[in-house]
Image: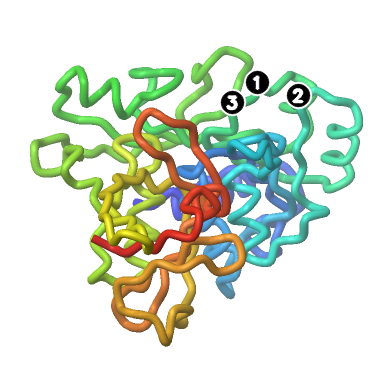
Amino acid sequence: MNSSLMLRRFCCFNTSSSSSSLNFCSKKKPLVFLGSPQVSTTVLDALFNASTAPDSLFQVAAIVTQPPSRRDRGKKVMPSPVAQYALDRGFSSDLIFTPEKAGEDMFLSNLKALQPELCITAAYGNILPRKFLNIPPLGTVNIHPSLLPLYRGAAPVQRALQDGVKETGVSLAFTVRALDAGPVIACERLEVDDQIKITPEESWLYFDKEALVLHNKVRAFAGWPGTRAKVVVIDNKNGHHNILELKIITTRVCNHNNVQGNEVDDITFVKDALAFPCAGCTTLEVLEVQLPGKKVISAAAFWNGLRGQKVKKL
């Protein structure tokens, strides 16, 4: 059962069993999503897609995420992965809230004005005060990647694999003040075996696949083990070749080939991204990379550091 279907069933059940005269299932109700890292975009994507269905129970009225942060050598301020994903999907920037703390009066006032029926959190990264939890009538539901009450808190997937458990899963639970201690609404169990454990060797990106396939892999492997690619840097003066291993941090998909006229293995720089040509005349645009032992930098910072050298896929 996917998370959006679990939430839809929860919303119908919770409303039909209440004394409210509002019929949640017959009219779309405002929902607010809270999340920050790349992995949270998977949940947001599911909510966006479910909200556009003809029989949708809700609409995404606002997004709450961590404030923009400086994430490269140039100290450029960049939005959180969730905020960037929402903007790429055409979501209004006016409805993306980035409070330092979820208890700020101005933020809570704006949230109340939206009259959200339900809030959904997935790795938001901020403690929600009681003032926040009292706003949505249906409460706040957290999507947590473990079978609660097991593996509360951070890194539950990694800790479950580290412990060698045979079964894990995803839980939907009401949010309360204590960490991951609210009543569990639903859970989906997943057996853990060697075939589904992710190994570092699986993190490599191969560009004989279409860009969307690779983009989804970057999203799925965010955090650990991440995704990597090898490129070769060629000095135009002496022809010297230097192989670099890049960790690919954030990407987006371009459905047309931005690098027409160049050799098939050439990596170019288009606007703010490194353009990797892929199968099907698609292009994977890489927005952030990380060299071994270094900090995450923007594609522009990496490109400027090449100082005119050519870079190719390996």
Q: Residue beneath label 2, please?
A: 101
**Camera-side residue of 116 and 164:** 164
Q: Nearer the viewer, residue 180 or 269?
A: 269
Using a 10 Å C-alpha cutoff, classify the residue at mark 2 as few (fewer than 14 neighbours), some (14 to 19) or many (20 or more).
some
Label 3 or label 1, whichever lies nearer to me, is 1
Image quarter of residue 233: bottom left
> Is tag 3's residue or tag 2's residue first in the polypeptide sequence?
2
Asked whether the beta carbons under mark 3 and mark 1 sit within 8 Å of each other, the answer is no
Point out the residue furthest to the left here: 194
Q: Of 81 and 116, which appears nearest the observer?
A: 81
Measured in 3D between alpha carbons, the distance from the residue under mark 2 to the one under mark 1, in whole angstroms, is 8 Å
In this figure, which residue is indicated by the disc labeled 3?
175
Residue, x 53% and y 21% (percent of image)?
Answer: 182
Asked whether the viewer can see residue 165, the reply is yes
Q: Is 254 positioned to the left or the right of 93 in the image?
A: left
Location of residue 68 with respect to 175 vertically, above or below: below
Q: Is residue 138 visible?
A: no
Which quarter of the rendering shows the C terminus? bottom left
Q: How many marks?
A: 3
Foreground tag (3 vs 2): 2
The reply to whether dot 2 and dot 1 touch (C-beta < 8 Å) is yes
Judging by the rendered image, the residue that carries numbered circle 1 is 127
